[in-house]
Amino acid sequence: MAKTVPDFSFEEAAARRGYTRIVGVDEVGRGPLAGPVVAAAVWLDPDHIPEGLNDSKALTAKRRERLYDEIMETADVSIASCSVEEIDEINILQASLRAMERAVAGLKSTADYVLVDGNKIPAAFGLDAEAIVKGDARSLSISAASIIAKTWRDRLMVDLAQQYPGYGWEKNAGYGTKVHLEGLQKIGVTPHHRRSFKPIHNILYQDKSISD
């Protein structure tokens, strides 16, 4: 099966319906045990779309870094997050939607149409929007948002890894890898861990009878 390559067809279809400021939004970091969930909203200038945009997971770190810089130079970009405290309070799905709402609200120019990666549209957008499953591999605007969100969050986790060594965050971005889980057992829980997530909850409450 041929790989899907993102294009500008969703954006062009919205433009034909009369929308003038069409943005893509994506979030990253729903699965990790540590760190915030991060969203990015991106409006691409149709005349200056960086070459090689794709789902951030399909790109090498080096290519993501280069595209990150190009997108930041040529597009209207907003990055927002939801903290671990918010994740624990309202759950990861609601926190992801809230981060996307914040990202869209933070754009320099107000969007009038939003292309959202996934199958849920944040209610608080207050804007016409379209949910696109696997949108980061189908829409250039969402691809750009996925690259921005992932690169920004990865950089943050590298910074946090310097403050809290021993969990491998510089390589695992807070996901529950073997190194991360071993670090939790040896060092314990940090302020950046999501206490509502089962492995962290189990360590905090020493509930060793529940196996993951």
Image: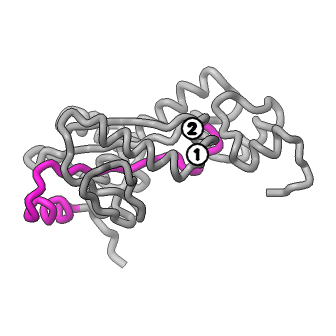
Residue 105 appearing in the image: yes
Which of the pair 37/88 is nearer the observer? 88
Q: Is residue 146 above or below residue 12?
A: above
Residue 133 in percent (x, y) is at 38, 66
Amino acid tagged 2: Glu
Residue 5 in percent (x, y) is at 28, 64
Q: Is residue 212 above or below residue 61?
A: below
Amino acid tagged 1: Ile
Q: Residue at 40%, 56% (x, y): give it.
A: 58
Which of the pair 106/73 is nearer the observer? 106
Circles 1 and 2 in contact, beta carbons < 8 Å: yes
If the image is split into quadrants, where does the N terminus sit? bottom left
Q: Quadrant of residue 42?
A: top left
Q: Name the mark on residue 73.
A: none
Residue extent of the magenta highlight: 7-35
Residue 171 shown left or right of residue 152 in the figure: right
Q: Which residue is mark 2?
A: 86
If the image is split into quadrants, where does the C terminus sit? bottom right
Q: Name the mark on residue 90.
A: 1
Task: For mark 1, give the secondary structure.
Answer: helix
Q: Is residue 17 magenta?
A: yes
